[in-house]
Amino acid sequence: MTEKELIESGNMKMDWARNHMPVLSIVRKKFEEEKPLKGMKVGMALHVEAKTAVLVETLAAGGAEVAITGCNPLSTQDDVSLALGTRKNISCFARYGVESQEYYEAIDRVLDIKPDITIDDGADLIFKLHKERTDLLPNILGGCEETTTGVHRLHAMEKEGALKMAVIAVNDAMTKYLFDNRYGTGQSAWDGINRTTNLLVAGKNVVVAGYGWCGRGVAMRASGLGANVIVTEVDPVRALEARMDGYRVMKMADAAKLGEIFVTTTGNRDILTAKNFKSMPDGAILANSGHFNVEIDMEALESLAKSVRTVRHNIKEYDLGDRRINVIAEGRLVNLAAGDGHPAEVMDMSFANQALCVRYIAENKLPNGVHKVPLELDTFVARMKLQSMGITIDELTPTQKCYMSGWECGT
Ligand SMILES: NC(=O)c1ccc[n+]([C@@H]2O[C@H](COP(=O)([O-])OP(=O)(O)OC[C@H]3O[C@@H](n4cnc5c(N)ncnc54)[C@H](O)[C@@H]3O)[C@@H](O)[C@H]2O)c1
Ligand SMILES: N[C@@H](CCSC[C@H]1O[C@@H](n2cnc3c(=O)[nH]cnc32)[C@H](O)[C@@H]1O)C(=O)O
């Protein structure tokens, strides 16, 4: 495709996404009228694709100058990246398939605009700010973090007294993790696996590692597709929940012998290791939908393999001699590196939270540390989403309010 055609394709993807993101549209309208981000610079490292582009546009509509790069070397969609770069007050430095050096250089280029506010997905900008670009920290009003692992890391920094800025844990908004992590990952991980493999899920043994919000979604949708689902966990309560939700629960060492498709969703490392690869059935398919590329021990797999070849677009087959193991998208997020990411209607809520939190940071002086998304913003997103879906709900009567909250109104 020529550059012009790529830009057209990126614009078309953005139009489609925008038309399916009603809550973000409401926020954008307000931003256009009130310009709450006038004079602000926002630096972002998120998956550069169409829904993210609609968030970027929204911030620019609020008066911000925005610079963005990717948060994963394989999730950038170059057509969207180019289309974004043509917009006023927006620079985009992301490119698909970048090597590590270019990935981190692009993060520096975002920081070169001297952002007032940052938005991260995995805390890359914040780590760089704290390790190498500390001179920029005094100007930063605050940042937003999109994902579970990023929030964990920020809590760890805060605990050690290392966090020198305010950050809002957008992931922890109810209108984020209950929908994005669960229904978003549940649908988009399978979209990525199915479109990449073109194989049947029904009747297969699917092993889901981790029964958190992502794992629940992935297991639920696997079950809906007719798979026999096996869950592995380290948390006894979550393991119990998985069992009572109807799945088999066992150690990975045992699950590895049975699984035909494996999906990791733990946010942890070394979930599938050399020991597991050696006991998997021939032809097993491995995908990660958790964090970065460390859940599947790719180094161990490479060193075990007698040969490696691409067997289909985005699938590498590792021949161990007595069995072949297939890995989708190099063990990186299968929904983004082998698909288009979460559905637009889900990212609508995640990114409405992001936009509202950026505004909140611009309008309130927050002390250093990890902050919750204010409940009124979270509830606003839920109400607007219901409204956009044409759903109305009941309201408590004064008598019911009294009954629920007092001790004198009831039996
Ligand atoms: N693919 C996506 O688009 C997407 C979307 C949202 C979140 N995420 C990422 O997915 C990961 C999970 O997010 P979440 O919100 O579900 O987190 P979560 O904390 O709710 O769930 C993670 C689960 O993994 C379990 N776990 C940890 N180590 C394990 C091990 N060794 N074996 C088995 N289970 C183990 C934990 O006990 C926990 O129940 C994070 O890295 C998050 O950033 C990805
Ligand atoms: N940057 C890390 C962190 C995990 S990304 C997980 C986050 O991606 C977000 N996400 C999922 N799908 C999309 C999408 O289509 N566009 C933008 N972000 C998405 C989602 O909100 C989730 O919290 C990595 O690439 O491995």
Image (tube, helix red, strand yellow):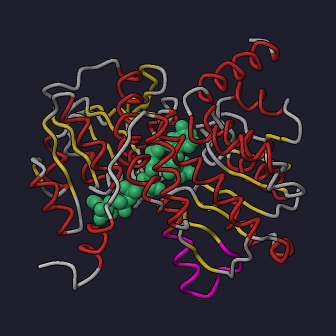
In the image, residue 157 lies at what x, y percent? 58, 79
Q: Foreground: 236 or 383?
A: 383
**From the viewer's perspective, is residue 3 above or below residue 243?**
above
In the image, residue 215 lies at what x, y percent? 30, 50
Q: What stretch is highlighted in magenta?
A: 152-166
**From the viewer's perspective, is residue 59 above or below residue 375?**
above
x 23%, y 41%: residue: 220
274 horizontally vs 174: left or right: left
74 horizontally vs 292: left or right: right
Q: Tell me where residue 309 sits by quadrant.
A: top left
Is residue 240 highlighted in magenta?
A: no
Could you tell me which quadrant the N terminus lies in?
Answer: top right
Q: Foreground: 237 or 166?
A: 166
Q: Foreground: 32 or 104?
A: 32
**From the viewer's perspective, is residue 366 above or below residue 311?**
below
In the image, residue 152 lies at what x, y percent? 48, 69
Is residue 160 highlighted in magenta?
A: yes
In the image, residue 331 lies at what x, y percent? 45, 42
